[in-house]
Image: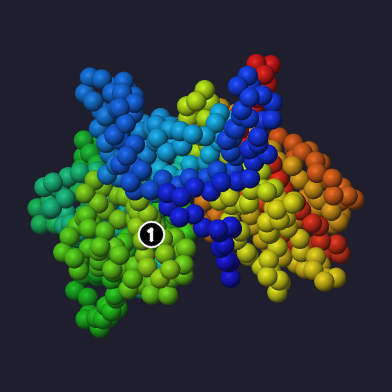
Amino acid sequence: MKANYILGAALVLGTLSLGTSCENYFDEKYMGNGDPQITDVRTGMTYELTDDDYKLLTTFEENKAKALALDPTDSTGLKELMAIATEKSFTETASADMYVPALMQSKFPYLDNGTTCDVLYTMREGKSSRVKEFAGAQGFALTTNDYETIWQKRGADYLTPATVTGIPAFLSGKIANAKEGQIALISYVYSEDEPDPSELSDFLPYELTLSELLAFPDEKKHQISGIVGEVKSTISGRFYMVDGEASIYVYGLTDENGNKVWKDKGIQTGDAITLIGRYSEENGEPQILDAVYVSHTPANPSPAPRRAKQARHFETVNAIYQLTADGWAPYANEQLKAAIALPQRIYESAGVSQITDPGIILKYLQATYPYAADKEIYLVAYMGKNGATADEWVVNGTEFVLTTGYITETMSFERKNNAWMANISTYLQAKFVGEGPGKFTIQHVSLDGLNYIWRYQAAYGMTASAYVSGTNHRVEDWLVSPNIRLKKSVKPQLTFDQAVRYGDVTNNPKWLNVMVTDNYTDDVTSTEWKQLAWPADLPDGSNWVFQSSGIFDLSEYNGKTIVIAFRYDTDIDGVDVASAPTWEIQNLLLAEPAEEENNE
């Protein structure tokens, strides 16, 4: 069972965590007045905004001027600034890098140039990428014509296990110019029971008499009934079908596989006949083309026992489909515990055709998933007031909580020229040694009876080992970063120093991994991760010397919010753990390259 631990002492909202700095000292050189100069340069600081801070930063004249400069014509910027106080969060346009410096100046005016502080704040980013996929979703209920297309001439106003498999092909023709990722929310009538072949005619669509067809002709395929009149050819099944005064020429009659049926079925003049075909006027004469035999009744037939129709249960099914590289398929996402198209009975019980009250969905989830586990994610697709859409719900303890798109982010701020400013070229910095784990967390997946794998050691930084008391254990343990905002990044690069002792050069790269995701679920086991290739060789395990990791280029995540993680995993099938490595990490930096590198 996965466990999640926040390392270090918990921050109290609005309190300051001050790390030890080698730059806090008495300057014993005299500066002309004979007094020692005291500087207060601090690193390793963290500060988390409080509700009062969000209100306070909207009162600074400096921030109001910045907001008005964004759009002086209609004060949109100022309105967005004021919304920070009520929403207690920032947005893309009303961003933390613009407005937090004034707040920091008011709170920490005495700290000296060179001081850095990681500020934690709430970002109103919007819903997850999974939910955003539903922005262009199409929603519709199958029509009679749709059922006929899926049944391929057999036809019934419902689907069965044999015909529901035809939905992907149907969607390919239904939704023109669809792009990969397109989502469709469809509704259809369904029965578990396949129809008996003798009953198929009872369910074929567009049942018409010949007189009705001739009165309102169209080129759709219809099931048509009449009497066999003059026969032109018993070989190819050409004959006139009559109905009172009406008459039409049937140009060839076969079974649904194209086989001749006239003699096999024993069709005679005067028999009542039912067939499927389409109206045409080729050569100026009304005709039925592509005629397929359904049934016929001999003239003056002897009474036959009538077979009772099969009792059949029908239900309306709502389903989600998505266009993949291989075609349309039922929607699936491994990051989710369940992806649900809200059942039709929920609409009916609420007496609505559209869902506008999330409480309706909440009651459904509570009743349907009473044993949902903490951190599980449920996606519910439904018809809203603007068409097909979806929401995600996350289990918090035992309660379902609607995800609103509010996330906690961290941004580095630095005091320069006696003023605070966002260090927008540094996205995450963690020395670890002497400063603690910061906002990194540990998630245990499998510990093989141990109490921990990853831990913080003041002298070495973050360390991990599966060797305890002479035993090498098969374990999986993760060190996970906070959310990292790369919305304005250009060439973000990750580096850190590491020491690796023991293990072996063949298996250490398999056991020690750097992972990244742009869609973190708060659970490493349900998140879709990408394993990064090592840019430089790992230390060979022969000593405790720290080496640079090399540069991990994260440019593919520009414009996104990511999480990085260090996975220590000796629990790999087929790999014997003869010697478990010890892994030590310090001096982590995720930032833009140095200015001189950009100019090369």
**Residue at the disc numbered 1:** 393
Furthest toward the front, the residue is 34
In the depicted view, which residue is nearer to us: 387 or 27? Answer: 27
Residue 540 to residue 112: above or below: below
User: Badge 1, how many Cα within 10 Å: few under 14, some, many 20+?
Assistant: many
Measuring from the top left, give residue 318's x and y in whole percent: 32, 60
Residue 445 figure quarter: bottom right
Residue 159 figure quarter: bottom left
Residue 50 to residue 340: above or below: above
Measuring from the top left, give residue 343's x and y in whole percent: 30, 64
Residue 248 appearing in the image? yes
Furthest toward the bottom, the residue is 305
In the depicted view, which residue is nearer to us: 270 or 488? Answer: 488
Measuring from the top left, give residue 454's x and y in whole percent: 68, 59
Residue 269 appearing in the image? no
Total number of numbered discs in the rendering? 1
Dividing the image into 4 quarters, which one contains the N terminus?
bottom right
Q: Residue at x 65, y 36 (%)?
A: 25
Q: Residue at x 46, y 33 (%)?
A: 109
Residue 441 figure quarter: bottom right
In the depicted view, which residue is nearer to us: 92 or 532? Answer: 92
In the depicted view, which residue is nearer to us: 234 or 174? Answer: 174
Left or right of residue 507, residue 432 in this image: left
Q: Residue at x 64, y 21 (%)?
A: 31
Furthest toward the right, the residue is 542
Residue 344 to residue 237: above or below: below
Measuring from the top left, give residue 350's x and y in whole percent: 18, 65
Badge 1 marks a residue whose secondary structure is strand
Dividing the image into 4 quarters, which one contains the C terminus?
top right
- The kind of residue on which mark 1 rests is Trp
Q: Residue at x 47, y 27 (%)?
A: 419
